[in-house]
Amino acid sequence: MNRIGIDLGGTKIEAAVLGRNGDMLWSERVATPKGDYAGTLRAIAELVQRAKIISGDVTGVGVATPGSENPQTQLHRNANSTCLNGMPLRQDLQRMIGVQVRTANDANCFALSEAIDGAGSGAPIVFGVILGTGCGGGIVVDKIVRNGANGIAGEWGHTALPNALDVERAREKCWCGRACCLEQFLSGSAVEMDHALVNSTARISLKHIGELAAVGDAASAATLNRWIDRLGRALGGVINLLDPDVIVLGGGASLVGGLVDRLAPAILPHIFADSWSTPIRVAKFGDSSGVRGAAWLCDTLAS
């Protein structure tokens, strides 16, 4: 049976059809109707109708979302696309599309994609990390997304930065209302803002910061050093708690040259062991992992 996946992002909505063996049969992207809940539902429904032309009959549709569904109220929450919050997103989509719908946080879908046939394929426990405009995490065990009792397993981006320094604690609160969230320090946009703040300069892209550091710019090198130190502290906590078999990095920030090689020594001082061997890998499917993971959710729709 073919699978239909939807990746609902803040700027774009992507639909894809995966074949039996995970081959991409079709995909399409449209702009997200910003701040428009009803328009977002219509855009997804129209994409699904076009996907069905390629897929044929399907048992359901998987949707990767910002935020997650509250398992008690069945209302959506914690999405930075705030028009989704407080709404019965999954149920509304199910009524419009006419088939069963399963939703999962976009970072969970990323992790699922990479665990099934990506950079974490074959590993029993995969922790997926998204370092992009935001910062998130997802946990997959034995190829099944683990949402947890309250639907918030893997909400790594909104845990506090370990061993925060005074200068880090002095930052403004995160959009979620908490202080020292990892998203404020580890996302690509956070690194760009950190560089501008520390150096009292205009904001430049993380890619440019990496390029400048590579040719010896001291300020840019210091920015990357701060970022990698913070990543080491944050991932050390994940390893102490979960001890995953593989950590997979995704998002634009994961492509900074030399990041993977520099993470191991940054993590070691923060784990409860004298050595460790967990592989850290860059995602195989890049920004298609979200929609692929959403499509793989279809395999659990009947469970």
Image: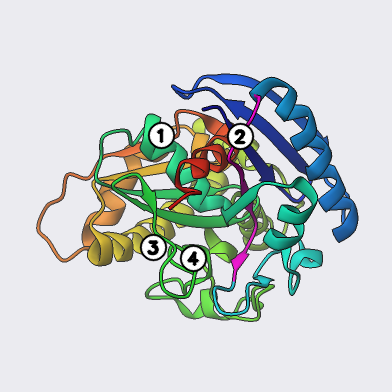
Which label was assigned to residue 234? 3
| Sequence-first disc among 4 and 3 | 4
Which class describes the residues within 10 Å of circle 1: few (<14), some (14-19), or many (20+)?
few
Per the model, the C-alpha gap separating discs 2 and 3 is 40 Å
Residue 61 in percent (x, y) is at 62, 43
First-in-chain label (2 vs 1): 2
Please report whichever mark, 4 or 1, sits nearer to the chain's N-terminal start.
Answer: 4
Question: Front-most of 116 and 262?
Answer: 116
Categorize mark 3 by other alpha carbons within 10 Å: few (<14), some (14-19), many (20+). many
Q: State which mark lies toward you, 4 or 3.
A: 4
Up/down of 159 relative to 2, above or below: below
Q: Which residue matches tag 2?
A: 58
Numbered circle sitting on residue 104: none
Q: Which residue is at 76% across, 64% downward?
A: 84
Of callouts 1 and 3, which one flags the residue occurring earlier in the amino acid sequence? 3
Q: Residue under circle 1? A: 258
Q: Is residue 138 visible?
A: yes
- State how far apart marks 2 and 4 are (Cα): 30 Å
Residue 188 painted magenta:
no
Q: Is residue 243 left or right of residue 210?
A: left
Q: Secondary structure at mark 4?
A: loop
Region of the chain picked out in magenta, as a range? 56-69
